Image: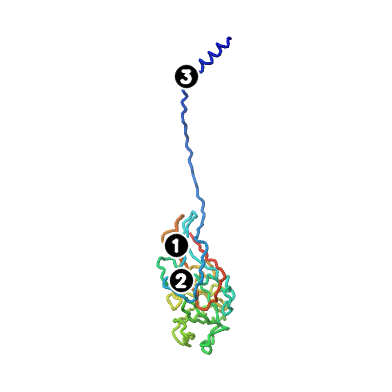
Amino acid sequence: MNTKIIISIIALLGVLSLPSIVLASASDTVTINVNVSVYALIEVSPKTATFNQVTPGYEPDIPDSLAFTITNVGSVNFTQMYVAVNVPGSEQTNPLGTGDVSKYFAGGFVVLKNETDLTTGKWKFVGRQEWNLTDGKPEDYKGHESTWAQAWGYFGNVSRQYFWELVNGTNGLCNGTSAVLNMKNYAVNGTADAYVPNSGDYTPYTVDNTDNPDWGIINAENNGPLANYCIALRTDCTRIFIYQWKQGDSQLDSCTGYWYLYDGPNEFAPNNQFDFNITVWVPKGIPAGDTSPSTLTITATP
């Protein structure tokens, strides 16, 4: 074939219009099913609380507190939340008179409230531990102590200090039903009567629960300086532990008067948030410096 003819044919084909192609769409469906597993998880923010230059005995009308938020980041509803400090298990050596601030654990100074009213009267200790002064009793108290008292000391409620003494039970221990904590109803004022539970206005707290081998438990109810608190007396009478909030510790949960951090009536559902505030009350007589750190544990239950 002639070359010119071939070129002509190619040129002719190049100008021919081709038929248009229509692309059709197609679709199908997929059914999605998701089953969310049971996952209990909360987050507390912030993660640390630091209180600097706290003056012992200073009690402002509105404390300088820190706000915390609890978020339900799990998949289940919670109905109750409680809070605890690891003081009884950590502070097992009497720090009184040592001059060593590291022997005091920070959790013993923490007070908490879960309401919007931040005035002083609404705050309660999470867990205040007080040790005996048997080997260092006040001069005004000498010669006046009950012959049956096994230990005595102070409950330090910020600027106020209330004198107390422990009377052991018939078994010689402080976790029996006959064990008694006697506490003065008014703060120490420098007179002998301020130290003598049996010669003035005082409140006797009697052990209610003796099921615990390590602690005798008292429900203070509406009586005296420890009204509404739960009180635990160490079996060997060496210390008392004062707490308002449910501890989540089988040794201390036999008190029926504790409060929950959160207790309905609405369930704490996933992605819900709840706020609370804490501050610290440092009683008089605490050495300067850094205390040993403590852990504040929040537990939520279905």
Name the mark on residue 124: 2
- Give the spatial CA distance, label 1 vs label 3: 75 Å
- Tell me the kind of residue under disc 3: Ser
- Tell me the kind of residue under disc 1: Asp
- Give the spatial CA distance, label 2 vs label 1: 16 Å
Instruction: Name the residue carrying label 1.
Output: 275
- Tell me the kind of residue under disc 2: Lys
Label 3's element?
loop
- Regarding residue 217, the answer to whether it shows in the image is no
Which callout, 1 or 3, points at the residue further toward the start of the chain? 3
Label 1's element?
strand
Which callout, 2 or 1, points at the residue further toward the start of the chain? 2
Residue depicted at x 50% and y 50%: 36
Camera-side residue: 62 or 85?
62
Camera-side residue: 87 or 37?
87
The reply to whether discs 1 and 3 touch (Cβ–Cβ < 8 Å) is no
Q: Position of residue 268 (x, y in %)?
A: 45, 58
Label 2's element?
strand
- Regarding residue 116, the answer to whether it shows in the image is yes
Q: Quadrant of the N terminus?
A: top right
Q: Residue furthest left?
A: 117
Mark 2 surroundings within 10 Å by alpha-carbon count, few (fewer than 14), some (14 through 19), many (20 or more): many
Instruction: Name the residue carrying label 3.
Output: 17
Q: Residue furthest front?
A: 4
